[in-house]
Image: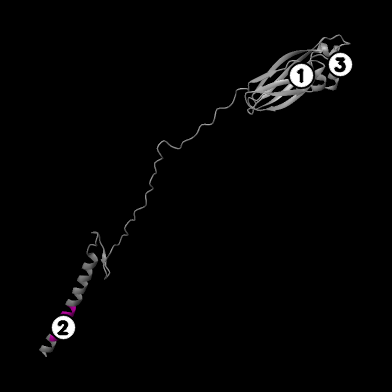
Amino acid sequence: MDTSRRGKDARRTVRVFGVGLIVVLAAGAVAAPGPDGGRGGYDGDGYTDPKPRPTAEPTATATAPAPGGPITTPPPPRDTTAPGVKTRAPRGQTARSILKRGLVISVSCTEDCRHVTQVFVSRKQSRALRINRRARRSVLVGRRTTLLKANVARNVRVRFSNKAKRGIRRMRRAKVRKLQLTVATSARDASNNVKRSTARLSLKR
């Protein structure tokens, strides 16, 4: 009787000791430090870290500008110079010759230009030849616009108005020996620079 009771007590002691050993081992696993030295646990496959590791954020890399920066070409300087103009009336022209063929003027520009030629008669002769009896200033009797190439001389023929032609035919009766004309020219280039000039002509009848 005593022997069986002792056997039961021994088995009970072994069970209690086994359960206590399991509890101690489990508590040690929970309290054991993790791989990084902190408090972690053991899940059967390895240690678990209670705090997630911070992930490194990508840093923006600043790109340095190219040495010297972009190369910019400065704009060309603005053209502020008026074209040079040469004007000349060929010899041998008379008041009678210009009635049929018009007044011939030789002109040239130092650059491409729009050339305008205007021919005027003085106020005094305009009244004497009855071109305009009430004229208070010089009277326009002919006009011509020409496109000229750079450094290319060209003969410009200016035709007269019908009133001017009738007045020239009256020169003998009006006792006018020479026809006094004023030739005004203007040359305009692509940049709107204008060169103006004036010349006086005296043509025999």
The extreme bottom residue here reads 1
- Badge number at residue 171: none
Instruction: Specify the amino acid type for callout 2.
Output: Arg
Looking at the rendered structure, the kind of residue marked 1 is: Val
Q: In this picture, is 67 found above or below 185?
A: below
Disc 3 + disc 2, Cβ < 8 Å: no
Q: In this view, does 79 lie to the left or right of 142?
A: left
How far separated are the C-alphas under marks 2 and 1?
145 Å
Q: Which residue is drawn at 24% across and 66% down?
A: 30
- Decide: is 78 above or below 136: below
Q: What residue type is labelled 3?
A: Arg
Residue 93 belongs to magenta span: no
Q: Distance between the residues labelled 3 and 2?
A: 160 Å
Q: Earlier in the sequence, mark 1 or mark 3?
A: 1
Q: Is the magenta stretch mostly helix, strand or loop?
A: helix
Residue 110 % position (x, y): 62, 23
First reached walking from the N terminus: tag 3 or tag 2: 2
Horizontal relation, residue 169 to residue 111: left or right: right
Q: Residue drawn at (84%, 19%), measured in percent from left and top?
A: 165
Read off the magenta span: 7-16
121 vs 20, nearest the viewer: 121
- SS type, badge 3: helix
Dot 3, crowdedness within 10 Å: few (<14), some or many (≥20)? some
Instruction: Give x and y (percent) for residue 107.
Output: 69, 21
Circle 2 is placed at which residue position? 11
Q: What element carries label 1?
A: strand
Please, what secondary structure does the residue beneath circle 2 have? Answer: helix
Q: Mark 1 points at which residue?
A: 119
